[in-house]
Amino acid sequence: MAKITVNENLCKGCELCVKACPRGIIALSPDRINAKGYHPAELTDEAKCTGCCSCAIMCPDTAITVER
Ligand code: SF4
Ligand code: SF4
């Protein structure tokens, strides 16, 4: 099963990965704030991740690692 890991302290909450995910399963965390003061992206439904890497390719800060 595929999943992504977000390096929270590299994330700037730009939401490009949120828009890039064809499954719509990435969102900014409503309750966590990273060291830069941003709400970091998180995977909301691991079971639906296909490992397509769209999110990781889109992220300008290379904060996303895809495992599959
Ligand atoms: S690897 Fe693909 S399906 Fe999984 S979270 Fe990223 S964009 Fe979405
Ligand atoms: S694209 Fe990268 S920097 Fe932007 S919200 Fe997603 S993980 Fe964070």
Image (spheres, helix red, strand yellow):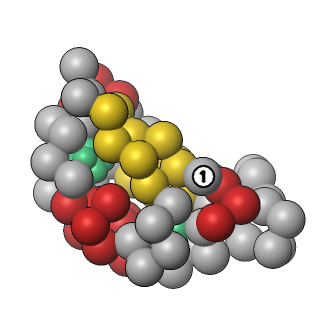
Q: Which residue is mark 1?
A: 7
In percent of width and height, residue 53 lies at 21, 53
Quarter residue 66 falls in: top left
Badge 1 amino acid? Asn
Q: Residue at x 44, y 55 (%)?
A: 64
Q: How many marks?
A: 1
Quadrant holding the C terminus: top left
Q: Is residue 40 left or right of residue 5?
A: right
Q: Residue at x 30, y 73 (%)?
A: 58
Nearest the camera: 10 or 12?
A: 10
Nearest the camera: 53 or 28?
A: 53
Q: Is residue 33 left or right of residue 20?
A: right
Q: Pointer 1: residues within 10 angstroms few (<14), some, or many (20+)?
A: some
In percent of width and height, residue 57 lies at 26, 67
Nearest the camera: 44 or 63?
A: 63
- Examine the rendered structure and indicate whether residue 36 appears above or below residue 67: below
Q: Residue at x 71, y 61 (%)?
A: 9
In percent of width and height, residue 46 lies at 35, 29
Quarter residue 67 falls in: top left
Q: Residue at x 85, y 65 (%)?
A: 35
- Is disc 1's CB within 8 Å of ligand 2? yes
Q: Is residue 58 visible?
A: yes
Quadrant holding the N terminus: top left
Q: Is residue 36 left or right of residue 56?
A: right
**Label 1 residue SS:** loop
Q: Residue furthest top?
A: 1
Q: Is residue 28 visible?
A: no
- Examine the rendered structure and indicate whether residue 1 appears above or below residue 43: above
- Examine the rendered structure and indicate whether residue 66 appears above or below residue 38: above
Nearest the camera: 43 or 62?
A: 62
